[in-house]
Image (spheres, rainbow, N blue to C red):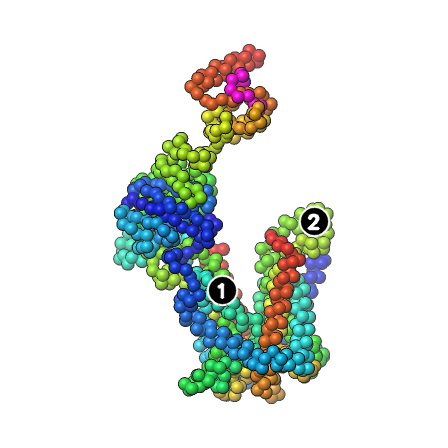
Amino acid sequence: MKSRHTLRLLVLAYIALLIGAPLFLVFQRAFADGWSAFVAAITTPETLSSIRLTVVVAFLVTPLNLVFGIAVSHAIVRHPSRFTKLMNSIIDVPLAISPIVIGLMLELAYAPNGWFGSQLAAVGWQVMFSWPGIALASAVVSLPLVVREIVPILTELGTSQEATAETLGASPWQVFRTITLPNIGSAALYGGTLTFARVIGEYGAVLIVSGNVALHTQTLTLNIAENFENYMPQQGFAGAALLAIFSIVVMIALAGIRRRERNFHGH
Amino acid sequence: MDIDLQHISKSYGGREVLRRVTLDIPSGKITALLGPSGSGKSTLLRIIAGLEMPDSGEVVFGGRHITTTPVRERNIGFCFQDYAPFRHMSVFDNVAYGLRIRKQPENTVVTDVTQLLSRMGLADHANHRPHELSGGQRQRMSLARALAIKPSVLLLDEPFAALDAQVRSDVRQFVRNLQHELGITTILVTHDQSEAMEVADYMAVLNDGVVQQVGPPSYVYDHPGNSFVKTFLGPTTEFQSALIRPHQLTLSHSGRGDQGTITDIVQLGFEVRVFVAMEDDSTLWVQMTHDLFHRHSYSIGDKVGVSRITANNLRNDTVESATSASEAHNVG
Amino acid sequence: MPAGERLSGSPRTGRHKVTMTSSLRRHSLTATYLSLLVAIPLLALCTHALAGGPSQLWRSVTQPEGLRAIGLTLGCAALATLINVVMGLCIAWVLTRDNFTGKALLNSVIDLPFALPTVVAGVTFMTLYGPMSPLHVSLAGTWMGIVIALLFVTLPFCVRTIQPVLETMTWTAEEASLSLGARSSYTFFKITLPVLLPSVVTGAGLAFARAVGEFGSVVFISGNRPFHTEVASSYIFMLTQSQNFDAAASVSLILMLIALVTMTLMSFISRRIVGGVRR
């Protein structure tokens, strides 16, 4: 049918132009001068330091949000109350607001002269303009990701398996460990991967809270941006290509988790 | 072990689901809790199990008050309607679950579970996942899992509802035989009265949170205590302002009995249903066997007399049909 | 389960009510985490926004530069959402109802804008459509550049909300319509679209909210020229950098409210139009 072909063509052209072209450009510019130039670009002290900071923060924040995400999902689905509904709404907030606003909120609350920050400063903790601030901002922007993966799985799981385990003599913790956790494992892995990727890629919120001092509080995304602003596009594209490769690996991993989950349960 | 339920009451969001239910469950028998949806039968089962707590009343197991004992300490076996298989474990691990929780030594676990799986006809599937089993096999696995821990009472929530009709009757027999062999007190919740009649030794009919009648199924069927029980347990029709079983009525072409006209005939193989519009504008139906129907060759539009079957008109029936058969023979 | 029965994974004692305070105690750890991360900062934002009273809030929001920024953001977000609602539907349609080699690849590519860091998209678009563009266009510093960047980041939302609905749809109603003599296009608009409308609106809402708050991918190509190509998030950033916290908080609050109102309005309208069509 002719209309089917034209629709298909329209869609392919749109995707090619909107997504394909930028992706192609990133790699083309990054490797314009060859592989060694690329490696040299991503191994400058500033870039390496920014990579290290970004990765450390990601490995810190992801388990934290995973544990929180599992606990809160369990509360929302298995012990519903007005309070858990309130928590559910609050968790969705970071999804709806700009990362700049998130950065602003955190600065207002935790800067040394801010709300909370003044209490913390008294104890000698500095949250803003240092890596804890970056970790905090990353945790906030990725907060909903694990919960939104696990809640539907828990709901679909239903309570009969858990109740059966109880009738067979299992304590609440044993039920959680032997029945609940194995069933949400894939969803947790998926959400955790999304979280990790989101933290690595965050820009707007960390721009505000980090102070952006190279070699100290600069993440990879900030590093890339700075390179472009200082008219070093070659450097910038190298970092951008690195992140693009990372994103593609993440997407492959996510697809793999989805496929494994389907085979596992024989759907 | 016998179970006593004393004045069990339970409400959900303002709606009374169980109203002071008092029931004695006989030891070592299969008792059916029979009733329509919303009668409270599943809630009652869950309260016996300890998955829910009653608002008031007591649950007594063999003389011990266990109303507030948590479910995992009651040593019961519970089978859910959807069988609740542990999807991420093999059949073997499913059945072994309760034993492992109780820290039974692994070598005895293996022996016990293997034996049980053979008994249930699942020995070949020990290493399979639940989703690889058929519905009937999953049901047997769920039973095996509950029985592995040697519970003092077995609780089944609509155990046959999800099975195909053919498989259903086989599994019902299987469960009945198994229970007779093991002698374990069993309580089964169902909305299907034929199931209760086929499987249970003892029956409690519930409606709207209240026990309507208890007793052996055949007794309750023949001596229903009220119109709800009568209507729920079997077909009824109204004759001379009373509820009566359609198979207790008979038709006759001679003027005997209340007069009416046949309006519809439904043939269901062995059973035939004849619908009659009576002279007083009521309608009823008569249930008769295929043979009887064809002997009298009833058709739509016939004027017939409807009366209750007694020893007398049973004899007259035979005479009448013999007459019409010989007439037909003479003509033919 | 019979109606009115409570699903319970653990015995409910049913003898004491679940109150707010008992819930708080049970979930104290998670509640603390949530407060530190979201509740407290949100509160701080609101207090700063309303620090000088409603009149000051009004004044901050109605600064000429701010108004331009908000207007530009809303306009570009609306346009990008509109375009992607249509294209998202087309893409979801092709992905579920068409078949060709490379379709699986296409399906995977859709998620890329969601997985890719915004700054990567930002600098790439700047290069692709800015000065020295290989395509010989120069859209840097124009609203068109902003819209293109927004199209990129909002595409996954518009596709992924519609796709599952299309995949699980039964087409018997459409077949009935065709058998009654209706044309394909008529069938589509009268029969199919009303069923898809809720998911289309959800996707549009997510896309719009994302577009309104977008920063990393638009800040480069927009050039940030005040009064011309400065988007709301850049404006707020500028205010923050100049220590103008109360004003920044005020504008942020208004932006959040606008997004909230728009999404509520859209779901309300969709419910009115569809009137509870279920399939």
- Residue C18 sits in which quadrant? bottom left
Secondary structure at badge 2 equals helix
Judge whether residue C89 is colored magenta. no
The quadrant holding residue B72 is bottom left
Bounds of the magenta span?
B251-262
User: What residue is drawn where x is 57% and y is 73%?
Assistant: A97
Query: Can residue C266 be spotted in the picture?
Result: yes
- The residue indicated by pointer 1 is A85
Q: What residue type is labelled 1?
A: Lys
Q: Residue at x 67, y 53 (%)?
A: C191
Q: Does the stretch in magenta take in B258?
A: yes
User: Circle 2 is placed at which residue position?
Assistant: C178
| Image coords of residue B73 (percent x, y) | 30, 55
x, y (%) of residue B135? 44, 47
Q: Mark 1 lies on which chain?
A: A
Q: Kindly check if marks 2 and 1 are in contact, taking CB atoms under 8 A apart as contact.
A: no
Query: In terms of secondary structure, where does tag 1 sit?
Result: helix
The kind of residue on which mark 2 rests is Leu
Q: Is residue B314 above or below residue B275?
A: above
Residue C59, by quadrant, is bottom right
Q: Nearer the viewer, mark 2 or mark 1?
A: 1
Chain letter for the residue marked with disc 2 in the picture: C
